[in-house]
Image (tube, rainbow, N blue to C red):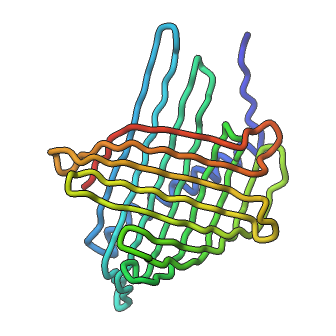
Amino acid sequence: MKNTFVCSQSSVRRILRTDMIFMICLGLMSASTLFAGKWEYSINGALKTQTGNTDLSSFSVALSSQHEGDFTIGSWTLKDAEIKFSIGHSRGKLKDVLYENDGNASFLLNYHANQKFSPFFHFYFEFDSTASLENRTQMGFGAKYSITKPFSISILGLWELEDYVGEDRASQLRWSIRPKYKKSFNSGVSVSYVAFYKPLQRDFNNYLLEHYATVTLATKISWLSVNATLEDKFNSRPPADTKKKDVDVTVGITLTF
């Protein structure tokens, strides 16, 4: 049997829109050094291949750029700011069948990041073709409250543009409630857990629920660490023929410089 790929006009527009978002984020990450000197960059990656009775190949890669401290552009200074760009992509095939193809890009500006109370702006873009999600774009303003040193909670109001295959594009408002726990131990182990509850503003029974748990182990090489990440995503009302829940476990390495 011969496989035929038909690229419609709408498919081309989606591809160009996705590529444009990723190129903008990469450009902002590259240009970040023009505005401040204290930037930290990291690359996280994982790769798996298997041949024989099972033909499988998969990879994931994530890039991030982060600045903490006073941020100055000309005569304008943000005190105690956290600025972060990130971009990631995962893809996997099993016997030439695509079982994973997703990506995301985000930008965070957190003012007074190390104070008890800090306002922030957040932008997020994602796609997941195996879950019929052509793209979801979110942006909004919120506030974080640090309860203790490792634990904080935030609430964010989001404007969202959501586009599923075969459905009308939806422009809507969401809330995002996020508890977070992050702690580093003297042994070189770091633990991070973040959860997002994102109900629609007009219908709290229509929500996204996301969990991210990461364990990072430092090595004797200062710029190299090993990490394991669990991602658990739930959509209370997905499109037809799409499962509500996706779980992904990744073990990889991180390079920091």
Asked whether 163 or 143 is in front, the reply is 143
Asked whether 257 or 227 is in front, the reply is 227
Left or right side of 169 for 99 = left
Q: Position of residue 160 (x, y in %)?
A: 70, 65
Residue plotted at (42% across, 66% down): 84
Asked whether 257 or 74 is in front, the reply is 257
Q: Position of residue 184 (x, y in %)?
A: 29, 59
Identity of the residue furthest to the front in this view:
148
Please tell me in which quadrant of the rendered image residue 182 appears.
bottom left
Left or right side of 95 for 191 = left
Which quadrant of the figure contains the C terminus? bottom left
On screen, residue 50 above or below 239: above
Asked whether 86 or 192 is in front, the reply is 192
Give the tally of numbered discs: 0
Residue plotted at (21% across, 50% down): 223
Residue plotted at (51% across, 8% down): 53
Please tell me in which quadrant of the rendered image residue 200 appears.
bottom right
Left or right side of 206 for 196 = left
On screen, residue 108 above or below 15: below
Residue plotted at (59% across, 37% down): 101
On screen, residue 220 above or below 119: above
Q: Position of residue 152 (x, y in %)?
A: 46, 71
Please tell me in which quadrant of the rendered image residue 97 appears.
top right
Q: Position of residue 75 (x, y in %)?
A: 35, 91
On screen, residue 137 above or below 201: above
Which quadrant of the figure contains the N terminus? top right
Identity of the residue furthest to the left in this view:
220
